């Protein structure tokens, strides 16, 4: 199961540095990796529409409706990025017309569902696949290794590993794409129904 420490130690191995089980920040590369970690995690989640980190919910209506639209809905605080807005659970279809305004979603559909990247997965490393974590390790190594204008075998190796791991992580995620089912009941706009599900291309 991936952890923050295992991701950073994997990056250290790619850099040719000794592992640091306690993440001793007095060591140069450990400190660099720790400092880069949160930004790299956010960037990796933004790079792809990750199925494992996506959540689908039926939105709760808010009154009164915002101007120009028939209905206004609250959005969960954990929503890092909107993927699709639908009036049913068919997320293979395009989004319906909507506007994201001041933390709320505005539509003309009384029943509105949202599929989004769930920010809670940023810190829930236990929910990551090993391939996702391995790609993140390579990104971290790529981020902190000094840039040079000369041929460099370490940088070449990191970049080669990074490209392969990114492809592997995205391929695994595509194979585990969840299927969403319509919840029972007619009035779903006030219910919450949860189903969990670039640069490096």
Image: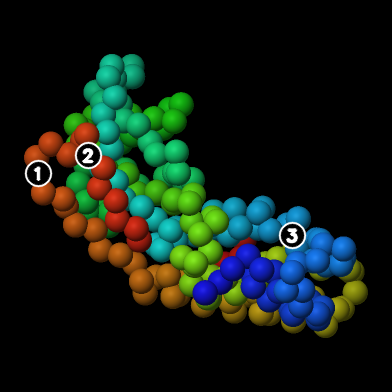
Residue 53, how many percent across, how many down? 43, 58
- Residues tagged 2 and 1 counted as in contact (Cβ below 8 A): yes
Vertical position of residue 29 compared to residue 109: above or below: below
Question: Which corner quadrant of the image does residue 192 belong to?
Answer: top left
Mark 3 or mark 2: name the one nearer the start of the chain.
3
Residue 138 visible at all: no
Foreground pick, 80 / 121 = 121
Residue 86, how many percent across, how many down? 26, 44
Q: Which residue position holds label 3?
A: 34
Foreground pick, 63 / 170 = 63
Residue 185 numbered mark, or none: 1
Question: Which corner quadrant of the image does residue 7 belong to?
Answer: bottom right
Instruction: Describe residue 200's horizontal placement relative to residue 12 as left or right.
Output: left
Vertical position of residue 99 compared to residue 89: above or below: above
Residue 4, how many percent across, how many down? 63, 65
Q: Quadrant of the C terminus?
A: bottom right
Q: Residue at x 76, y 55 (%)?
A: 35
Neighbour tally class for label 2: few under 14, some 14-19, many 20 plus, Cα within 10 Å:
some
Residue 55, how many percent across, how many down? 36, 52
Q: Which residue position holds label 2?
A: 191
Q: Residue at x 46, y 26 (%)?
A: 102
Q: Residue furthest front?
A: 22
Look at the numbered disc 3 and give the secondary structure of its residue.
Answer: helix
Tell me the distance, in whole angstroms, between the alpha carbons under discs 2 and 1: 10 Å
Residue 33 visible at all: yes
């Amino acid at each position: 199961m991936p952890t923050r420490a295992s991701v950073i130690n994997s990056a250290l191995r790619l850099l040719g540095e000794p592992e640091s089980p306690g993440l001793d920040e007095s060591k140069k590369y450990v400190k660099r990796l720790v400092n880069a970690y949160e930004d790299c995690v956010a960037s990796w989640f933004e790079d792809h529409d990750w199925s494992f980190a996506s959540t689908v919910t039926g939105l709760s209506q808010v009154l009164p409706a915002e101007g120009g639209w028939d209905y206004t809905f609250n959005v969960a605080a954990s929503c890092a990025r909107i993927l699709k807005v639908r009036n049913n659970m068919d997320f293979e279809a395009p989004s319906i017309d909507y506007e994201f305004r001041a933390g709320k979603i505005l539509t003309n559909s009384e029943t509105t569902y949202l599929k989004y990247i769930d920010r809670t997965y940023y810190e829930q490393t236990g929910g990551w696949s090993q391939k996702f974590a391995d790609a993140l390790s390579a990104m971290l190594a790529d981020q902190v290794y000094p840039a040079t204008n000369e041929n460099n075998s370490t940088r070449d190796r990191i970049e080669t590993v990074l490209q392969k791991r990114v492809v592997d992580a995205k391929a695994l995620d595509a194979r585990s794409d969840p299927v969403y089912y319509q919840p029972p009941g007619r009035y779903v706009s006030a219910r919450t129904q949860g189903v969990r599900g670039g640069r490096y291309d």
